[in-house]
Image (tube, helix red, strand yellow):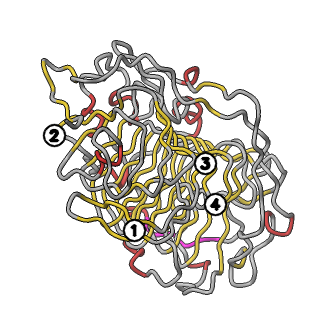
Amino acid sequence: MDSLASESNGNLVGTADDDNTVIPSPTQPAAPEGPSNSTDSKADADGFDMVEGGDDKEFTTEDSDTEETSFAARHSCQTGNPVDDCWRCDRNWASNRQRLASCAVGFGRNAIGGRNGRIYVVTSSRDDNPANPSPGTLRYAVTRPGPLWIIFAYSMTIKLKNELMITSYKTIDGRGVDVHIAGGAGFTLQFISNVIIHGIAIHDIKPTGPARIMTSTSHVGNRGRADGDAISIFTSKNIWVDHCYLARAADGLVDVVRGSTAVSVTNCYFTQHNKVMLLGAHPQDYIDRNMYVTVAYNIFGPGLIQRLPRVRFGNVHVLNNDYTSGWGIYAIAGSEGPTILSQGNVFNSYKGSKQVTKRIDDGGSTMGGPKNWNWRSEGDKFLDGAFFTSVPMKWSAQSYSKTVSCSARPASMVERMVKGAGPLSCRRGAVC
């Protein structure tokens, strides 16, 4: 028998008591420094700040052997964060889990995940056979047809043998327990729609494959080598990643590529990584001109170097994020004429005069040159010499209207809004 559970009298059948503490946060080392000729360089005559490859130098992030500290002290009810204020004050959240699907903001706001589907309870951390997963495992759950709301019977660490191919209309909900995806492969969302990933710690991800992997109940196929992304979103839409902890992957932490769109990344805690978030993979992927991504209410923590995010072609709204741990080479960068609106973020350089942004020449189309790209900072707070750009940028009412995905709060509210970033400590009968 598999672990499909029904609802009875508003309670989830088959779930364990949600009395576990939340994912710990690593001790915060100082952000590694990039070389001086790449972090503070002035734009060239055409407006570019750096040539592609300048972000490929070898950087390392510090590992800590000390005990990790809890996120539990960093949350409260009614913070001004519109996602959290939508559901976190409900003491009956465990009986109303699917309410979460109505709380997304930004370009991924229509991601419904497994709403209106049955509850599936993961009861095993094993991943013995990616081509024929056992009932009760996470891989079995995400490859079932139709909408499912996937929860976990108890705290567990899952070491995926190969990339986890997630099908459409799924929610992976880690609330109430402590769920780690670690030491193996990460998540792949390919040619799908409507997925919510909430409350999961994904870290120490390795390259895997080639291998035979179940991608759905009707298909088992040969997959090539996976690079080791924590979350790879490929030609997919209506995706929401919320309250996750992401660190230390072989490649990127979040990649949104090849025509993916309608994506929101909110309330996540990023740390100890080089190339964090890639939005658009190649200079030839003109399909990414129709990419729309929201990056909001996240903490970009210690030990991050670059790509917070790095954008090609698309339209990206970056709002109310905490960048106060600094960065190595740059925070936000782009090429191929992306439209980037930065609102209400808090940037701290810790290094004197240091530019937040980089306009990159990667050999692709310059789309009229960086001076004609639509980049704008509005209401951002800059500390210790951080600054957004040294080159005047074009901006239009049309650019603004298509890039504002939700309302930004003042930068003065960011500290309070992001206190719950990362997986939350949720117990039955209490607010998260």
Residue shown at the point (37%, 49%) measured from the top left: 240
**C-alpha separation, residue under disc 4 versus residue under disc 2:** 36 Å
Farthest right residue?
Answer: 36
Q: Which of the labelled discs sits on residue 275, or is there none?
A: 4
Residue at (39%, 29%) from the top-left corner?
A: 175
* Magenta stretch bounds: 392-399
Q: CA distance from mark 3 to mark 1?
A: 28 Å
Mark 2 or mark 3: name the one nearer the start of the chain.
Answer: 2
Pointer 4: residues within 10 angstroms few (<14), some, or many (20+)? many
**Dot 3 amino acid type:** Asp
Which amino acid is tagged 2?
Answer: Asn
Residue 291 is labelled as: 1
Image quadrant where one finds the C terminus: top left
Q: Quadrant of residue 302?
A: top right
Q: Judge from the rendering whether residue 26 lies leftward or rightward of residue 187; answer left or right.
A: right
Looking at the picture, how far across and down is residue 112, in whole percent? Answer: 25, 46
Q: Are marks 4 and 1 in contact (CB under 8 Å)?
A: no
Whichever of labels 4 and 2 marks the residue nearer the N terminus, that label is: 2
- Mark 1 or mark 2: which comes first in sequence? 2
Mark 2 or mark 3, whichever is nearer to me = 3
Mark 4 residue element: strand
| Residue annotated with mark 2 | 116
- Do the residues under discs 4 and 3 have CB atoms within 8 angstroms? no
